[in-house]
Amino acid sequence: MLPLMENSVAVALTAGGVTVLVDLGAHELPAVTYWGPELPGLDAELAAALIATAVPVAGSNDAEPRPRVALLPEHRTGWLGRPGLSGSFAGAGWSPAFTTTTVTLDGEPVTGFTSGGAARLEVTASDDAGRLELRVTLEMLPPGLLRVRAAVRNLAPEPYGVDDLVLTLPVPAEAVELLDFGGRHTLERVPQRGPFGFGAHVRENRKGRTGADSAYLLHAGTAGFGFAGGDVWAVHTAWSGNHVHYAEQVFTGERLIGGGELLLPGEVRLATGEAYESPWVYAAYGRGLDDVAHRFHRHLRARERPVPAQRPVTLNVWEAVYFAQDADRLLDLAERAAALGVERYVLDDGWFSSRRDDRSGLGDWVVSRDVWPAGLHPLVDRVRGLGMQFGLWFEPEMVNPDSAVARAYPDWIMAARPEWPVESRHQQVLNLAIPEAYEHVRSQMAAILDEYAISYVKWDHNRDLVEAGDRTRQGRPGVHAQTLAFYRLLDELRAAYPHLEIESCSSGGARVDLAVLERTDRVWVSDSIDPHDRQRMLRWTAQLVPPEYLGSRIASGRSHVTGRHHDLGYRAATAIFGHLGIEWDLAEATDAELADLGEWIAFYKRERGLLMAGDLIRMDGYDDRILVHGVVAPDRSRALIAMAVTDSILPDPAARLRFRSLGPDRRYRLRPVIVGRPPSGLIPPRWWGADRSGRVLTGAALERAGVACPRVHPDQVVLYSADAR
Ligand code: GLA
């Protein structure tokens, strides 16, 4: 007996402890039969058995046979959930029936059952009328992370309109809870959790950017899943324009999670021979949320041009001076920064044309001679003379209506009608899909990058896209083309200036996704630097992005955003778990603060090899007001652990500190780390010892028994190091 039905094809891929089994039937679109922890012994016989036993019994009223839910589910099979591809030839041909024509694994044709490790499965198919060609790609990446995408090409003489293209993966019925994110400007990536009920949980984003409230990562997991435990399946749509994440449970019980781009009416209309390609939808299985996060972290750490762990300590001038750029003041700030050990200095908004506030000049990327009569040279030269890199702010996709560019080329502004869209921060969006507009921005940026020794660009994007139409094409929707043009501009500048690092900023953290992170080197997590809120924002932004890509800073004692006051120790011990910087008018800092700040910078520099390259561990089981997290060296020889008490707690002191993932049998010296002034209200436990030399424990003891905690005031962090003996 043949293990698989004749002509049937199946592919199993295993990497990073994860297996996916893809059933291609006999010329059918690929469907995931199994996705989860590694399945040993997965040979042709077992694959055939899994595929055969996965077929459910049809209810008396259901389609026969029960629909097969492909990565791109097809309505014509009887599937009544969201179809993978929605589109038509002006209303006709809206339910295509696809037959696969080729199946390759890493370019080699596949027949029967094939298994492999990290590899790319590519399937092409055509519809029964021969009018559409489809390509579905599934890639198993080395960290056990999957990604899927599809492209559809129109072969017919008449245009084909693509309304929606989503890709989706099945999760088992035990996945009963959902976790994704909401947020807003200055409070990004706030987790929300709820039951995985019937119907669709759909997170649409129509902001033309990833969004401060983006679903970010949509997880489905077993009851009570946490950082360490439970089975968790997650998807992330890697797209910086309009997009969707969704979870769907249909009446027949299938549960799916998926995503794709969100297309506006008529936005993608394919002429003969043209194709539309979806963004990658990433899919991660993990045992607990940390395992899911580690797969994404390993993926980013293995990308082309990864960022080094030795992230330069960065000073950004924004909260120090805002728009009040003054050469003497900024030169003085550079001197103070260098004296503290800062390694990169970033000049923010306000250096160009008439941009003295946020009402004018945006889009004219020419140095203001009013503010900088000799150009930026005196500042750039001084910064570099002090041994620091120089960085500069741009907002390439935006204009103030009060700007030379907007006055000269009003048609370059995105609009769906003759009137411009509602304003936001006094600005409009420049249509980069217009070649002349693109070239205008590219060449103005290139002129600045050619003239000055710039190592770093902070790339901002400060408004949502409303009525983002192309005025040169009757106002047709332009978000898709704008998103692609944005990627093209990044790619082109990175190729032309390979040494340049780029930060993705968008009113703080509104453009954080894996597509932008293929092309940029860090994200600005939030405009709020308040450590109380940052603790959670860093904790959850790290669900997708590793710490060395998370822009993190120490600001003034009183948060400019929340008005709260916090000790320097709390601000610094929060910020060091990302790519450290300062955003604070150092001229206002006291000598004592500067001394402590210098100590923190020196500490970060000593420890960044671990902080920026270790495995992130987040602990469950504390009141949400205590956040325990840390980083562990990949060889388990060291860890830095933080216990952040973000509010008044009961009991006081906190429950015992426990920490996982150290070598269970290895012995570690656990000791408190005090940098600068000790945490406020500190009453240490006896085991710290008078010399704070701590005690020696095994990794297992620290995980299972834990150690007594000190008492501290709310809004304090207690740091520990664990070093293997
Ligand atoms: C955005 C950014 C800030 C700053 C300002 C400048 O809000 O998030 O960090 O650069 O723009 O206008």
Image (cartoon, helix red, strand yellow):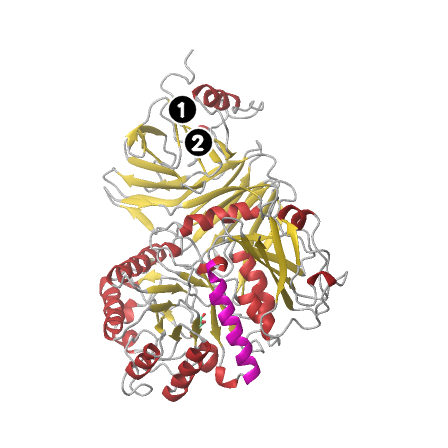
Dot 2 lies on which element? strand
Name the outermost residue toward the right: 651
Q: Position of residue 354 (x, y in %)?
A: 33, 82
Q: Are marks 1 and 2 in contact (CB under 8 Å)?
A: yes
Q: Amino acid at mark 1?
A: Gly
Looking at the picture, does residue 22 appear above or below residue 650? above
From the image, tell me which residue sits under label 1. Answer: 25
Reply yes or no: does residue 140 show up in magenta: no
Q: Position of residue 87 (x, y in %)?
A: 37, 41
Q: Earlier in the sequence, mark 1 or mark 2?
A: 1
Q: Position of residue 423 (x, y in %)?
A: 42, 71
From the image, tell me which residue sits under label 2. Answer: 31
Q: Magenta stretch: dominant SS?
A: helix
Name the outermost residue toward the top: 1
Tell which of 361 and 497 is nearer to you: 497
On the question of residue 298 being in view, the answer is yes
The structure residue drawn at horizontal position 42% and vertical position 69%, both measured from the top left corner, is 422
Q: Quadrant of the N terminus?
A: top left
Q: Quadrant of residue 135?
A: top left
Q: Amino acid at mark 2?
A: Ala
Looking at the picture, does residue 554 appear above or below residue 497? below
Looking at the picture, does residue 650 appear above or below residue 424? above
In the image, which disc is placed on residue 420? none
Reply yes or no: does residue 596 show up in magenta: yes
The structure residue drawn at horizontal position 56% and vertical position 25%, both measured from the top left corner, is 61
Q: Position of residue 236 (x, y in %)?
A: 46, 48
Magenta segment range? 591-609
On the question of residue 590 being in view, the answer is no
Q: Is residue 592 left or right of residue 105?
A: right
Tell which of 623 and 55 is nearer to you: 623
